[in-house]
Structures are given as C-alpha cells and as structure tokens.
Image: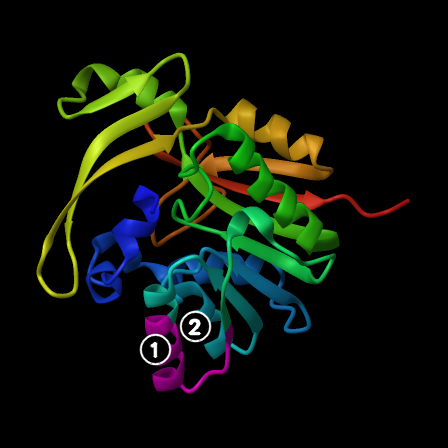
C-alpha cells in the first residue's frame, strides 16, 4: 500500500477535523463563479475525499460525481451526503485511470488529492491526461498543487524535511492519528511543481487560457499572482474547443 493510501485508511473522521478542510464553502463560491452558476454543467471531483466540495456543490443544485481511491473516505462522504439530503454518485476509482470520455464540463482536483502524490512524474501526468480526456471541449479544470518556488526559497528552513533540487520532491515523516486514536508515522513523498511546469503540461494536453494564482485556502480568487511566498498554487484552465 502506498503512503497516500495508508494515510487516509480508517482516518476519515480525523481528516474532517484538519484545519485545511474548513474552507469548502468559500472555495465553492469561486468554483461556482468560474462556471457562471450554470446548473447544466456536470462536475467531476477527482480525489474527492470525504466529499466536502462535492456536497457543497450538490447542495447548491449541481450534478456532481466524486471519485477517490480510499473506500473509508468515500463511505464517510456518502454518509455526509445523506445527512445533507443530496444525491451524489461517489465511486472508488484510481485517478491515474479515469475512464471518462468528454463527459464533464468541470473537473476539480483540489488540496493535493492524487496529483503531486504519485511515485513519479509519469503517473502524475496520467492523472492530468485522464482529466483532459474526461472534460468536454471548452470545459474547465480547477486544480491546486504545491508550489516549488516556495519550497526552493524556504528549503534551508526545513528541519524535518528534505527537498531535492534535482527532482523537486519533498520527503518527510507524516504523523497523524486515525479514527481509533492510533498514531500513524508514514514516509511521505510529494512532488512540488513550478508554475511553468504546470503550464507546459496542461498546454501539451490541449488546455488553453491557463491561469495560475496564489492559493488561499477557503477563499480562492484571482486577486493575487503566484509568488515564492505561496506554498500552493491555484490553477484554472480551459480545454480547447474542437475546430
């Protein structure tokens, strides 16, 4: 089992207590504005976790499908959706092998879900390829991911982490508690990307209007350009329409 699978195993309730998951409503405000409130647009939430964005969108009247590799995360997402009175199709699925063909008008991949956690760049690119394939022509991608410019600037301050300048991979010991109170210690590896790398990869997959901004949790916006002071970046891109 890969480290990113183990970290979410039997830890769905603990995940929902993390501070970085508390801003879903504000983030969905931005997502909704990006599609101009069009309820006819179908949405795919890749690596949806416990469904915080999917449920918020569904509660606002959108049709959403959520996919994730963790069955425990999905089970909690289903229970939360039921409690919220919304219907969402949650399905266990590997983001590297998305099977959809031009089905969605919007794809979300938010908060380092799947992308940037893979063992190598080929697997990361497979996620982006699957997303591109899943989108209808003219459809949008909203992605957040780790900013290598920040990591390069601050790497001297990493006391418990190692950032490799040759691979832009950060290795560290991730500690957390599962839903039974058991301590987990996992060897984590994350890929950090420069904005230019993201731009090139998306351009290769037929995306246009690629915009990259600073990522402020809970209040996504296009007001702040990305800089080396920002740990994460917010990416918005549109799949080219067919000629």
Q: Which residues are magenta?
A: 75-89
Q: Mark 1 vs mark 2: give the one in front.
A: 1
- Image location (x, y in percent) of residue 15: 24, 59
Instruction: Decide if residue 85 is on the left or right side of residue 3.
Output: right
Main SS of the magenta segment?
A: helix
Q: Which residue is mark 1?
A: 80
Asked if residue 101 lies in the magenta stretch, the reply is no
Q: Does dot 1 land on a helix, a strand or a loop?
A: helix
Q: Is residue 81 magenta?
A: yes
Give the image location of residue 133, x and y in percent.
70, 49
Q: Is residue 109 left or right of residue 158?
A: right
Residue 60 shows up from this direction = yes
Q: Mark 2 highlights which residue? A: 55
Could you tell me if the residues under marks 1 and 2 are in contact, i.e. CB atoms within 8 Å? yes
Q: How many marks?
A: 2
The answer to which quarter of the image holds residue 206 is top right
Compare residues 85 and 165 and report the one nearer the observer. Answer: 165
- Tell me the SS state at disc 2: helix
Residue 174 falls in which quadrant of the image? top left
The location of residue 122, given as percent across then percent down, is 55, 31
Quadrant (top left/top right/bottom left/bottom right) for the C terminus? top right
Vertical side of 189 occupied by 56: above or below: below
Which class describes the residues within 10 Å of circle 2: few (<14), some (14-19), or many (20+)? many
Which sits in the foreground, 229 or 129?
129
């Amino acid at each position: 089992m890969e480290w990113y699978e183990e970290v979410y195993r039997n830890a769905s309730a603990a995940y929902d207590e993390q501070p970085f998951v508390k801003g879903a409503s504000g983030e969905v405000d931005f997502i909704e504005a990006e599609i101009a409130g069009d309820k006819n647009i179908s949405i795919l939430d890749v690596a949806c976790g416990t469904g915080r964005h999917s449920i918020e969108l569904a509660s606002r009247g959108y049709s959403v499908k959520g996919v994730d590799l963790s069955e425990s995360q999905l089970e909690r997402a289903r229970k939360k959706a039921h409690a919220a009175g919304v219907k969402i199709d949650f399905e266990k699925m590997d983001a590297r092998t998305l099977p959809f063909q031009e089905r969605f008008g919007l794809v979300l991949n938010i908060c380092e879900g799947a992308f940037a956690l893979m063992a190598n760049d080929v697997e990361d690119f497979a996620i982006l390829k699957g997303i591109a394939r899943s989108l209808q022509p003219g459809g949008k991608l909203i992605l957040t991911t780790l900013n290598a410019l920040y990591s390069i600037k601050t790497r001297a301050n990493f006391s418990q982490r190692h950032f490799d300048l040759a691979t832009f991979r950060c290795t560290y010991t991730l500690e957390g508690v599962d839903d039974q109170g058991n301590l987990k210690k996992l060897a984590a590896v994350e890929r950090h990307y420069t904005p230019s790398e993201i731009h090139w990869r998306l351009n290769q997959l037929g995306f246009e209007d690629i915009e990259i901004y600073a990522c402020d949790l809970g209040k996504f916006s296009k007001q702040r350009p990305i800089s080396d002071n920002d740990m994460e970046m917010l990416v918005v891109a549109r799949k080219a329409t067919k000629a």
